[in-house]
Every structure is written in structure tokens, then in C-alpha cells.
Image (spheres, rainbow, N blue to C red):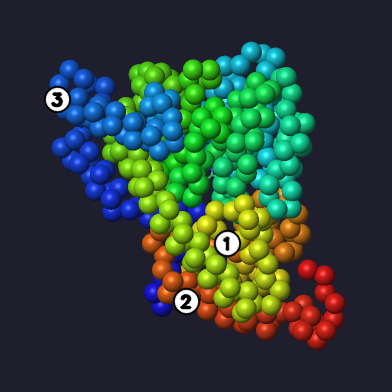
Amino acid sequence: MVPIYLDNHATTPVDERVLDAMLPWLRDGFGNASSKAHAWGRRADDAVHHARHELARCIAARPEDVVFTSGATESINLAIRGIVAASSPDRRHVVTLATEHKAVLDSCEAVRRDGGDATIVDVQPDGRVDLARLAAAITDQTAVVAVMAVNNELGVVQDLAAIGALCAKRGAVFFCDAAQGPGRLRIDVDAMQIGAMSMTAHKCYGPKGAGALYLRRSDVRLQPLIVGGGQEFGVRSGTLATHQIVGIARAVAVAEADFSTDDARILGLRKRLWSRLESGIEGISINGSVQHRVAGNLNVAIPCADANTLMMMMPNLGISSGSACASGATKASHVLTAIGVPEELGHCCLRFGIGRFNTAEQIDAAADMVIEAVGELRAQSPLWRMKQAGVEVAW
Ligand SMILES: *Cc1c(COP(=O)(O)O)cnc(C)c1O
């Protein structure tokens, strides 16, 4: 069977257009962008300059507000911990959501460990935060409010403009983790009043290990985590990785240019996948809001079908389960738990991430495979047989 990759929230393949843009900077364009005294350095510096402008244009930012990093994890740590560290001692409080990425939750935990404070706000069953609840968590001590653009498990999108307005009113910096943003959601940092925002290339058809941090330098202060040569306006030291910088800028630019066509096509594929799964699998349901969701995400619960077992039955299908093995025991993800999915059902959730290179034929083949595997698995499930026999079973 031909392998089918539908795990584009975990990572994406590198687009040929991105690879082509990167390769010259791994060959004779090897110069150090800081060595501006000679042609090699100036060429690399030009490439970085161009990439900075290209990326800034895609998010409606000023080029000098874009800092290149090694990925979203670094950008997140730098933003949350760096902004808190640069805040006055009476402003060391951060607010975030229970459904954020671990990099955000652990950065907030680091703030707490360093003597600050963190408030984690619950979300509604559809995965969206209630704005009144979020507002109530923000105090005069709040330095940063961290809310992601697109949830990596559920594909759920928060109301970024409303959250930005809320933060502006309270004098807190709105930090947005937009690792899943480019190519899935259009972002305008000014319109959404975003003060800092993390991005990563490998979630939008660029290379791994290439990230960026948008920082509204006019009014957001940040203490660097990595010091040294003073590159990137002193915010992030280290010799610039020209090929990676060119890679993330081109990946985001391509995602922006192709947004409308990609988005419409991918939405069609997701609807196709759902209609097949829904008609082929009794009791299947969607986790998280359907309305406020990016096109490519489908996260489903399939009662009486253990997700990790299903995935082992389909090694050539690249998808994710909603549970992971943590110190010997399988645990439902913190995101599924946060939206109220019971632990048992949390072990029966599959995440599909449809992307730029998927086809309708792949969707059909994947749906057939999942339907067949669920049938096989349920045939061995006593709980499922009870349900078939008419016994009321609570999921
Ligand atoms: C992938 C991801 C990250 C981490 O990004 P890296 O570039 O892999 O460090 C952070 N947040 C979200 C929402 C992600 O999807």
C-alpha cells in the first residue's frame, strides 16, 4: 500500500519552491551575514535583509520587528520569559489557556518558578476561550497574555482581534503562538494588536529548525535569553543561518500567496473525509468547534476503538492519536482533557492534518482504511458488542 501522509500539524514536507530558494545559501552563498566588509558577507546580509522584508510583509509587520530564531519553541520561550524578565517586579504575571502548546505552558511554569505568577484559563467545550473569563484573569500585574492562533490538535481558532483589544485595554502584551498560523489563517499583527508572535517554518512547508519572533519593538521590551554577538538587534545572538532564514521567509510567502487556492481545496478534502468517516463509522464525532476551525484539521472521537491500536494497524497512514505514553501509562492529551473529553474517549481520538500535497484519492483511501480498521477492532470489543446488542453504554 502506498503511504499516505495526513499528519501536517506535526510537520509538513518541504515545498520545492522553498528548497530551491534555500540551496544557494548552503553552496557558494555561505558567507557570514555579519561580515559586511566583503562580498561574501554582504551577499548573505542582503539575503537576510530580503527575507526579513518578505516575512514582515506577510504578517503586515515592520521588518525591524522580525527576529529570526531556531523555531517556535525558542520564540515562545524568548517571548514569554523575556518579556516578563524585562517587566517591572510588580508585573510578573502571565495568563494563558489550558489548551496551549507545552512550550507555552512550560514557559509560564518557568515564570512561576522564577518568582512570577501564572494563571491558566479553562476553555469551553468547543475549544474557544470565553472572553469574559479571559478578561477576568488579567490583572494590573499581568505582563503577558499568551493565546495561540490555531490549536495544533483541534485546529480551533481563537478570536485574536478581540483578545488583542482586551490586552490593549489592560496594558498587557498579547503574545500569540502562531506556529500553526501561516498557510492556515491570515494574520495581521497590527489589526489584531499582537505584541509578540511566534512562527516556525516546518509547519508551513519549510525546514525544521527555522523560526521567527515578531516583536512590536516600539512598545514591547524583552530581555534576551541567548547573548553573545548581538545579532538580531541584540535580541537573539548567534551567527545567522542564512539558508534557514531564507527558508522560513519563502515558506511563509508561498503559504500567503497560495492561501486562497490551498485553503478552499483543503477544506473540500476535509469535508470529503468527514462525510466518508461519518457514514462509515457509527458513533464518530468531531472534537472542537467545526465553525471556528482551520480547513485542514479533523480531530475525531471513535468510541470503542483505541487510537494507538488503530494506528498500529495502519502503519502506512500518517496520522496522530490524541494520547501519548507518559511514564509507562497512556494518557489522553491535555487539550482533549481541557475540552471535557472523558479520559476513556480521549484514548479513542484521531487527528488528521490535511495539507497542500494531499489529493482526493488519498483522502478516499485513508477513509476506507480507517473504516475497515475500526470495524476489525470493534469486532473484538466486548463493550462494542454490548452496545450492538442494545445495552445502553455511556461513552
Ligand atoms: C509545532 C508547534 C510548536 C513548536 O514548534 P517548533 O518549531 O517545533 O519548536 C509550538 N506551538 C505550536 C502550536 C506548534 O504546533
Q: Amino acid at mark 1?
A: Leu
Residue at label 2?
A: 365
Q: Tell me the element at label 2.
A: helix
Q: Position of residue 87 (x, y in %)?
A: 61, 16
Toward the viewer: 185 or 352?
185
Real-space Cα separation, disc 1 to disc 3, in angstroms: 49 Å
Q: Position of residue 207 (x, y in %)?
A: 36, 46
Callout 3: CB less than 8 Å from ligand 1:
no
Residue 311 in view, yes or no: no
Residue at label 3?
A: 39
Q: Earlier in the sequence, mark 2 or mark 3?
A: 3
Toward the viewer: 126 or 94?
126
Q: Amino acid at mark 3?
A: Ala
Q: Left or right of 298: which side holds 3?
A: left
Callout 1: CB less than 8 Å from ligand 1:
no
Q: Position of residue 326 (x, y in %)?
A: 64, 52
